[in-house]
Image: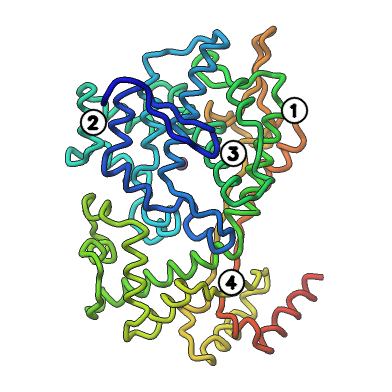
Amino acid sequence: MSEGEKVFKDPVHGYIYVRDPVIWDLINTREMQRLRRIRQLGTTYFAYPGGDHSRFSHSLGVYEVIRQMIQAFDRNGYAWPHDYDRLVMVAGLLHDVGHAPFSHALERLMQRRHEWWSVAVIEDESTEVHQVLESVEAGFAKAVAAVIAKEFPSSLAVSLVSGQLDADRLDYLMRDSLATGVDYGKFDLARIIRVLQPVDGRLVVRQSALHTVEAYLLARYFMYWQVYFHPVSRAGEVLLRGILERARNLVLSGKPLVLPHPALLAFLRGEATLDQYLALDDTILYAAFAVWQRDEDVVLSDLCQRFLHRRLFKEIPWSARASEWMETLKARVAAYGYDPQYYCVVDETSTVYYDYYLGRDREPSHNEAIWLYDKRSGKLTEVSSVSLPIQAIAQEHRPLRRIYVPEEVWRDQEVEEIMRRDDEANG
Ligand code: NI
């Protein structure tokens, strides 16, 4: 790299500053550049048109948050082991480098999660990322992978990249809220960075910042309900999964299928090598869908048309009585000529907004909880023990289930009747 500082303009942080040539070289690897072609929020753009930003900008953002955290430690005079500076900034930059096309939407179809692929990209000798890392010093790639896999010996270093108040969450909540235009997701990022403090090998929060932490956790809670679990966004994901399941079944049954990229075949067969996996991105899948929308298989072509032209399925709320009417619903779906396997889909998702609360009967690990630090007494207090709002959202982790069917089935009189009766029974 030529000398001097590189700067990116960014909607969340204003500017992202790169001074370390290693960071700059990593940004310019083909594996990092691939993230420009992967949507951060998968199918969320069906619900929020602005929510089609890339995983590349998020990755830069995570790096920048970590850089700012370290800078804030110095400004506040906190003890931080500077030996870890480059390690944690690099880990932040690379934490999502193994993401599949459409981010999380495909994960259920894959044998491995994106964290596994991220570690593979970092450790495999064939990647440009690995080569840049090993040019720093032998074994650096392993150390970076260990931070991302949460296996690095210093839990302080790990907590900047993954913990309850990590740079990843801080960046994606702000970025996704800004991109979608959902105001509930905002919180005071600059202040959170300012009140974080390394104490005895863990990252804690200054006592006076309780309400800043509350606002952050509530923002997270709202973002899940407003954006990440949005029924329209999930409807897009249901179609995406249906298309790939259908394509996989066709391939496995030996049916010829036009594939715009050879790596797609290995992926559908569940035997993609790292190289083949990295060949895939959103654009390859769109190309496949554009071809498949005219495939002679009616299920595949119909699902692709629906995805490309946003003819999404409609949502029927799950209920405790669903087992009583599920067969009737499937029969109605079949009556319209649809195969219930692809056209009557139960979608299930869940998360926890804050992983720890005092109602549990075991001690939380350091990174599971958010700790308030009283400078005078040196005492640490877990946040939900002093905050009713945090207690309330910490205890809420109901799984969210929905059933998706084509719109004409959803409008079908018999189906409307099922939903009406179910509603009544629920009071
Ligand atoms: Ni991330």
Residue occupying the point 22% across, 78% down: 254
Between the C-alphas of marks 1 and 4, the distance is 39 Å
User: Mark 2 and mark 3 in contact (Cβ < 8 Å)?
Assistant: no
Disc 4 to disc 3: CB gap under 8 Å: no
Residue 132 tag number: 2
Q: Determine whether label 2 and label 1 are within 8 Å by CB.
A: no
Where on the picture, by quarter, is residue 399? Answer: bottom right
User: Rounded to the nearest whole Å, what is the CA distance between mark 3 and mark 1?
Assistant: 16 Å
**Amino acid identity at mark 3:** Asp
If you read the primary sequence from the N terminus, does the residue marked by circle 4 or circle 2 appear first? 2
Label 2 element class: helix
Residue identifier under label 3: 355
First in sequence: mark 3 or mark 1? Answer: 3
Q: Position of residue 345 (x, y in %)?
A: 52, 73
Alpha carbon of mark 3 to alpha carbon of mark 2: how far?
Answer: 35 Å
Q: Which residue is mark 1?
A: 386
**Which quadrant does the C terminus fall into?**
bottom right
The total number of labels drawn is 4
- Dot 3 surroundings within 10 Å: few (below 14), some, or many (20 or more)? some
- Residue identified by numbered label 4: 403
Residue extending furthest toward the left = 126
Image location of residue 147, percent across then percent down? 38, 29
Residue 137: x and y, percent? 22, 21
Q: Quadrant of residue 327?
A: bottom right
Q: Is residue 27 above or below residue 81?
A: below
Q: Which is nearer the eye, 257 or 386?
A: 257
Q: Is residue 219 above or below residue 408?
A: above
**What distance separates the C-alpha of mark 4 from that of mark 2?**
46 Å
